[in-house]
Image: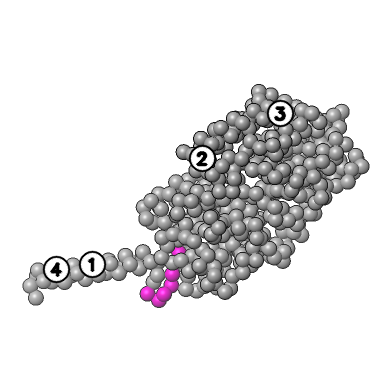
Amino acid sequence: MKKSGIWAFIFVLLIGIIAGCSSEQSTGTSKDGTVTLKYFAFSPGEDHEDELKAMIAAFEKKNPKIKVDYELASFDDYFTKLQTQIAGNNAPDVFELNYENFVSYASKGALLELDPLIEKDTNFNPDSINKKAYEAFQYDGKQYGMVESFSNVVLFYNKDLFDKAGVEYPNDSWTWKEELAAAEKLTDKKNGVWGTYSPVQFWEFYKTIAQNGGSILNEDKTEVTVNSPENVETLTWMMDKMNKYHVTPTEKEMSGQANEDLFKAGKIAMLRTGIWMFDGFKDVPFKWDIALEPGNTQKAHHFFANGLAVSKKTKNAEAAWKWAQFMSSSEEAAKIRIDSAWELPAVSNDALVKGYLEKSPPESRDVVFKALDTLVVPPVIEEWSKMTDMFGKELDKVKLGQATPEEALKNVEKELNTLIKK
């Protein structure tokens, strides 16, 4: 054979090898049929990487033909890296999204619809996940993500202050009316004790208006509904607790102290804050518990959640679905989360979170999961950061007495109409 023929043969052989490697790498499937998934996440951080490894080991034991190759990034860097990977046609098969970014990625068509995979999977029952939490990761009525973990806000209360004032503890039937009546009895200005507290800011506002049947946008986010009688009534209620009934401290009266610190000091009887404060309050020198938040016309609770989504361009859709489903609803993943205090799984089976429910304080930890039944999600739009900044400025004007609730919501309506029509 001539030298030129030899080199041509070698060239063709190398091209074949490279093509074979490229094909294997692009599909993530080895010759023995083992699929390797690329998984990208932010929530484990340094504190829970070992727990993630344990979850992967449990998953791979159940699915020996699927391997999970993970990459972690800090939350600050995560979405820049994710966007770069997607733009470079190198997206992970499965990746983590907090709820706000889930809506953004789903709306841009970057995520794989999961419904066909769910229908084929006879081993998965959607009822294994809290219905509201499961549906939160739908977009346009289709499932594009799986809730992975959540936290929320509930009503914390100082049982010692309630006992001292002879007030019955909050229960599920409470409305704003019962909360106010209790707060007036619990407020003790002589000793610097306030009956109730919730911040006046965007995150609290969109949840509180839902407790009065209000909303910021209509369901398909094509119309602004923020300047409604229900919402004016809600914002007025939030301010009246400070300025009319004097059961909530103003920012001036708080003197720069955080509301959580005032609760720990026994100076706030009822506080709306997140369940992430359980550890922060565990050593306070008084008894405390939690309850569902009182609403006016209905209950409504925050839902802060991370979910898993599958890339629309994945070549390993079935394997990717299995991993997302495992992280969302499996007994193994739920147990690892609970045992390590790494957020909470939104599972419907109390037995899977028994270890969490048995811890104390607070005694009424079941409230955390009951609150999921009335969850509300933030009204995410493309101009999300501009909207939250604008809300913050208008709510600050109300707090400073520079605008009435009616004036502020009228201004919000005008600016928000501009944002959703861009």
Name the mark on residue 120.
none
| Residue type, label 1 | Ile
Name the mark on residue 7.
4
Examine the image and state in which quarter residue 271 appears. Answer: top right
Counting residues from the N terminus, which is met first, the one under dot 4 or under dot 3?
4
Q: Residue at x 40, y 76 (%)?
A: 32
The residue furthest top is: 402
Counting residues from the N terminus, which is met first, the one under dot 2 or under dot 1?
1
Q: Which residue is mark 3?
A: 251
| Residue type, label 2 | Ile
SS at circle 4: helix
Q: Is residue 29 above or below residue 276?
A: below
Nearer to us: label 1 or label 3:
3
Q: Which segment did they paint magenta?
A: 31-38
SS at circle 2: helix
Decide if residue 419 is in sight here: yes
Taking 406 as reference, is 312 left or right?
left
Q: Which residue is mark 1?
A: 15
Q: Which residue is mark 2?
A: 420
Task: Give the camera-side residue of 146 and 4.
Answer: 146
Nearer to us: label 3 or label 2:
2
